[in-house]
Amino acid sequence: MKKQNGFTLVELVIVIAVLGILAGLAIPYFMEAREEAAKKECLANRTQILRMFHAQQAQGYSGDLTAFLAEVTQKENNENKYFNFIPGCADNGKYYAATTYSGNGVVCDVHVGDSSVMASINSMYEKMLNSIKNSDGSINNEALKELFGKDFSGILGKNDYLREAFNKYLAENGYNVWIEGKGVNGDDTVYFKFHSYDNGQGLLVYANANGKFQNSGDWTANYVYNPNDSKWYYFEKGVYVSNIENLNAAEAWKKIIQQGKGYEEVSLNGNNFVKA
Ligand SMILES: [Zn+2]
């Protein structure tokens, strides 16, 4: 009988199957290791940024942490004044400054739970939530306005990312309001936003399907709550809701509809808009 060289098909299939099983076991570990490395690198970068910020402050840097972050993380500028690399997140997390209450640090929206400042951030949210809760546990709108502040100068007024993060925190704590819903077409997700009017005395609520809170420059809304008649209106083509900070409710609404191209009344059913 001719001596057989190499492997039989059955042997090959077994070897391939075994290799497949081994790969299946190993890959999750590699993934985990990669995730761990990205997390650690992200935290190290954020720590570096904060240290550099404090060092620059000591030398007279007058901007706040948000401004500093914008400077050090901009990708177009290869001539980074402060680092010889662009400190960022390997998982494309966005950095934002948490500079209120006891929390002073750089937070990554992907690695938010791993941040060294997370404990103080959470205690800040807790304080904020407690400050806007009625005794029956519902949200006190007057107190919420305080967080936005006069002229948009409050904690939530100043920082889009903090606002979004706080909204998430509210959601996690059972306050499933103003986060997101469905638009009148049913297929689009709308994100609720806020804007102050009447020199901080009023809080305009609006929603749109075009973006998230991350789009800080996005002032175009599809849905606007009219504080004068306490009804929601749908602007199919969107409407600009900015430049109302110093107007009273009636003036603010007038300005909004002047900028919109037609609107219709809608109602809010839970977090979902429906045409009247
Ligand atoms: Zn990150």
Image (spheres, rainbow, N blue to C red):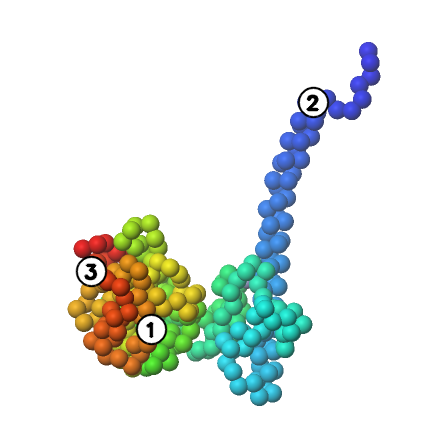
Counting from the top left corner in percent of width and height, residue 99 is at 47, 77
Along the viewing direction, whichever of 38 and 197 lies nearer the viewer: 197
Answer with left or right where residue 5 lies relative to residue 57: right
Q: Which residue is mark 3?
A: 265
Quadrant of residue 229 within the rendered picture: bottom left
Counting from the top left corner in percent of width and height, residue 207 is at 31, 63
**Mark toward the viewer: 3 or 2:** 3
Q: Residue at x 53, y 73 (%)?
A: 70
Q: How many marks?
A: 3
Label 1 amino acid? Ser
Task: Pick out the residue farthest to the bottom.
Answer: 60
Where's the C terminus, which quadrant?
A: bottom left
CA distance for labels 1 and 3? 21 Å
Task: Pick out the residue farthest to the top.
Answer: 1
CA distance for labels 1 and 2? 71 Å
Q: Earlier in the sequence, mark 3 or mark 2?
A: 2
Label 1–label 3 contact, CB within 8 A: no
Q: Which residue is mark 2?
A: 9
Along the viewing direction, whichever of 26 and 94 lies nearer the viewer: 94
- Label 2: element kind: helix
Crowding at mark 1 (Cα within 10 Å: few <14, some 14-19, many 20+): some
Where's the N terminus, which quadrant?
A: top right
Q: Earlier in the sequence, mark 1 or mark 2?
A: 2
Q: Which residue is mark 1?
A: 242
Label 3 amino acid? Glu
Label 2 amino acid? Leu
Crowding at mark 2 (Cα within 10 Å: few <14, some 14-19, many 20+): few
CA distance for labels 3 and 2? 71 Å
Q: Earlier in the sequence, mark 1 or mark 3?
A: 1
